[in-house]
Amino acid sequence: MSARGVLLVNLGSPASTEVADVRRYLNQFLMDPYVIDLPWPARRLLVSIILATRPKQSAEAYASIWWDEGSPLVVLSRRVQQAVQAKLDMPVELAMRYGEPSIERGMLALAARPGVSEILFIPQYPQHADSTITTSVREAERVIAKHGLSVRLTVIPAFHDRPGYMDALVASARPYFEQPFDHLLMSYHGLPERHLRKADPTGNHCLNYPDCCDRPSVAHATCYRAQCTAVSKEFAARMGLADGQWSQAFQSRLGRAKWIEPYTDARIDELAAQGVKRLLVMCPAFVTDCIETLEEIGDRAREQFIEAGGEELVLIPCLNDHPHWIETLAQWCRTEPTAA
Ligand SMILES: C=CC1=C(C)c2cc3[nH]c(cc4nc(cc5[nH]c(cc1n2)c(C)c5CCC(=O)O)C(CCC(=O)O)=C4C)c(C)c3C=C
Ligand SMILES: [Fe+2]
Ligand SMILES: [Fe+2]
């Protein structure tokens, strides 16, 4: 029996498309201080305001993309876990930061396996954000402390530049470039600008210059936007795309704060106005398709693009359970050194 167990961690989805389940999920998600980073009373007030209307609207959106087996994000994540498990002789579990299966359940299942003394914790995010990776790691640490688990935690951080990731992204997306197209839009999940500033360890780099992401800085080790930009540039280079043939934008804003720009919805209108007829969109902040890719881009952005004069929007699927990605994950599980 191997001493290592693996926990693949994704964001999570509501248990069903019922409004009450969506409300419960959104409450857990948005009350996380790493997601809405306000002091508790202000956070509680803001989330209560959001929960007055959002659950019904989100439940309809979830219902439009839900599969017979459940939430696409959870179903696809489960397929990934099973495919990685089939390649390894160490236990592989799946966990979600919000909803089920929880990180607590996954950690306890692994710790209960005979001989497991280390958990290789792999948040499924290519780029760093405190609202995704940091909160997941803190939850794992909380579970270890709460249950007194004698396991070592080895974390694979944001893997945008880790060997194998870009190869898998290129391999999975390449078939979509075989048909003629006018433009590729790389649309990432957005982030409030405040989160970017908070994650800057220098305190004076991120968003202090218009081209901050192009200027080398130690801040980029935790800069979401710099890591998105690095992925976009590397992907465009690997696909041989010319400048002007691709662009980057940020989707899924919530609330009134300023989020990082350019915004995807604005960019879609601009591209249509520039005469782009056949638009490819890929979403490299997500490794598994979810409401943000299938509904926000695959349905709403597509409709917006056509209304604005475009002819076709092709959504390139996320890595999901592409064999190249599965082998990459399995290889990381085999070779990642145990944390000191
Ligand atoms: C303040 C709000 C939010 C921040 C910050 C945020 C960061 C963030 N989220 C993802 C990945 C996903 N988010 C998803 C859904 C989703 N995200 C927010 C809000 C914030 N996200 C909401 C309210 C929702 C729920 C959907 C809705 O009601 O519109 C999902 C999909 C989940 C699913 O079930 O399919 C993912 C994945 C990242 C990577 C990120 C930071 C960069
Ligand atoms: Fe989100
Ligand atoms: Fe930057």
Image (cartoon, rainbow, N blue to C red):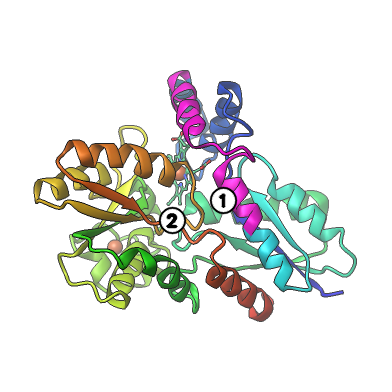
SS for dot 1: helix
Magenta highlight: main SS: helix
Query: For mark 1, what is the residue?
Result: 135
Ligand 3 location (quadrant) = bottom left
Q: Position of residue 139 (x, y in %)?
A: 65, 50
Tell me where residue 208 appears, x and y as whole percent: 23, 59
**Could you say whether the residue bearing mark 2 is in a helix, strand or loop?**
loop
Quadrant of res 185: bottom left
Q: Which of the labelled discs sits on residue 211, or is there none? A: none
Q: Which residues are magenta?
A: 52-79
Q: Which residue is mark 2?
A: 317
Please say whether residue 219 is visible from this viewpoint. Answer: no
Image-based side of 4 in relation to 292, left or right: right
Assess whether mark 1 and mark 2 are in contact (beta carbons under 8 angstroms).
no
Q: What residue do we see at 27% from left, 46% from top? A: 264
Q: Nearer the viewer, mark 2 or mark 1?
A: 2
Q: Residue 179: tell me if it is visible.
A: yes
Query: Which amino acid type is marked by label 1?
Result: Thr
For badge 2, the amino acid type reads Pro
Which residue occupies the extreme front position in the image? 179
Task: Compare residues 190 and 35 and report the one nearer the observer.
Answer: 190
| Quadrant, the N terminus | bottom right
Residue visible at 49% across and 69% down in the picture: 159
Extreme residue toward the left, this view: 274
Residue 200: within the magenta? no
Look at 33% across and 45% down and name the residue there.
251
Classify residue 124 by image quadrant.
bottom right
Q: Position of residue 35 (x, y in %)?
A: 48, 42
